[in-house]
Amino acid sequence: MCGIVGAINAKDAAPLIYAGLLALQHRGQDSAGMLTSDGQQTYAKKGTGLVSSIFASGLEQLKGSMGIGHTRYATAGSSFDLDTQPFHLDGKLQIAISHNGNIVNTEELKGQVNGKMRSTADTELILHIFSEYLHNGNGQASFVEQIFAAVGHIMQAVKGSYSIVMMVQGHGMLAFRDPLGIKPLLIGSRNNSYVFCSETVALDAIGYALHSQLQPGEAAFADNTGQLYRRQIGQDKHAPCMFEWVYFARPDSTHEERSVYAAREELGRLLARQWRKTGRQLDVAIPVPDTSRPAASGFAEELGIALREGLIKNRYVGRTFIMPSQVKRAAAVQLNLNPIRPTIEGKRVAVIDDSIVRGTTSKRIVQIVRAAGAKEVHFFVTCPPIKWPCFYGIDMSTRAELIAAGKSVEDIRQFIGADTLTYQTLDGLQQAIGRTALCSACLTGAYPTGINAGDIERLEGRRSTERAANC
């Protein structure tokens, strides 16, 4: 779940892309990069860490009216330095790429690029395959038709999730979305300038209006004159990732025409309705900051109980879920949350969180709340139990790390130490989001790209190997 931004026909692209990446920092905090073009040459800057640190200086050197940027959350690959995007290819055409998603047939695709890989990232595979097809394509067709034909080739060859922006020097900017639409991608506009990005908050940050979202399997090409061409190239059953609404997207974003904040608030209300059936009482609801605040608000409002801040987050630690190792996540939880004792002491506390993946963070949260004097601790989760790996861009890639893959709800309750544990239902999740067509493979094991048991074993093994290389 990375963040991508592309801008074309801007007076100065770099400041726009920088502001967009800052707005998308929550989507990845491992590394970031930007590549711009003035029509004659390209300018690049990359680094590990946060966007504000990487571009604290040197932004003025990224010249030109066109550029792309990326902030990375590593779920595949094994090198932060080599795998930092955007990637760039020199040749007859100079092409650069930023990618949000994960490819599941990388071994098959590597055989098509003849040892050209310089990184371990699946993004580079797409870049090489696209570039080679474009160079060998139908020279009699218009350039736009050649571009769309190359996108069609990618959609036939590449399996997995991908939202992509590409910069083709001297021609324009391309954006396209996989046929299932697993990852988000939007078009923003201002005058004859266009921006492609992952979330509406990026458009808000730079003052561009939402033009439209790209549909699953759709490509858009903006040329240097300001002309926008769109083409529906491939489409399958629409399956946007449910985790965008549960955790990844910012609450002030709108995704697939559904407010993220409203969806999370409804998730909380539905949990409250489950709880009401038990006949038990609660004194206060507290969110696990920051993602769960809307859900906690809906939960408390539905039950008519107090909503309070009971856990304060250290703003300088970052999002623990997207940290690249369990060691870093565990250390971060120790520093990340501190209780407000007067909110908690002597009370029957409802703790509202977005998900339980490994269980260790939830266990530590329950310990913190109990140590602050809670009379009872009841844990509520807006996402149903996560039982299957995600191979489309969320770092929960093996069943061994998923507590719900091998434990019952009661086992998990005992492990985290809560008095009760209440999960959202799959029906409740779909109701809150407002659609049944979702990628919920991590909940059900039904992968929209047709991953089978053998594929799961293979992909789990690959990710385990990559993690070992990062240790």
Image (cartoon, rainbow, N blue to C red):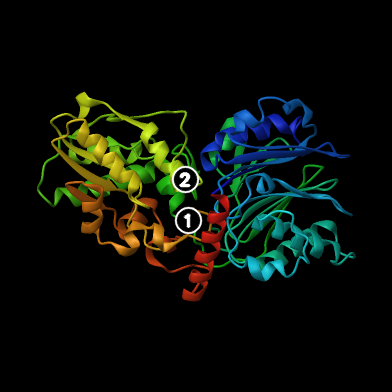
Identify the secondary structure beneath mark 1. Answer: loop
Q: Quadrant of residue 8?
A: top right
x and y, in percent, of residue 400 in the image = 40, 61
Q: Answer with left or right where residue 230 lies relative to residue 426.
A: right
Which mark is first along the chain, 1 or 2?
1
Residue at image x 66%, y 49%?
A: 83
Rendered view: 257 above or below 37: below
Could you give the CA–CA distance between mark 2 and mark 1, rounded to whole angstroms?
10 Å
Is label 2 in contact with label 1 (beta carbons under 8 Å)? yes
Residue at x-position 32% and y-position 56%: 384
- Residue 301 appears left or right of 97: left
- 187 w.r.t. 343: above or below: below
Q: Nearer the viewer, residue 417 or 191?
A: 417
Q: Mark 1 belongs to which amino acid?
A: Cys
Give the residue pinned by disc 2. Answer: 248
Q: Quadrant of residue 427?
A: bottom left
Say left or right for 327 vs 272.
Answer: right
Q: Is residue 223 above or below residue 103?
A: above
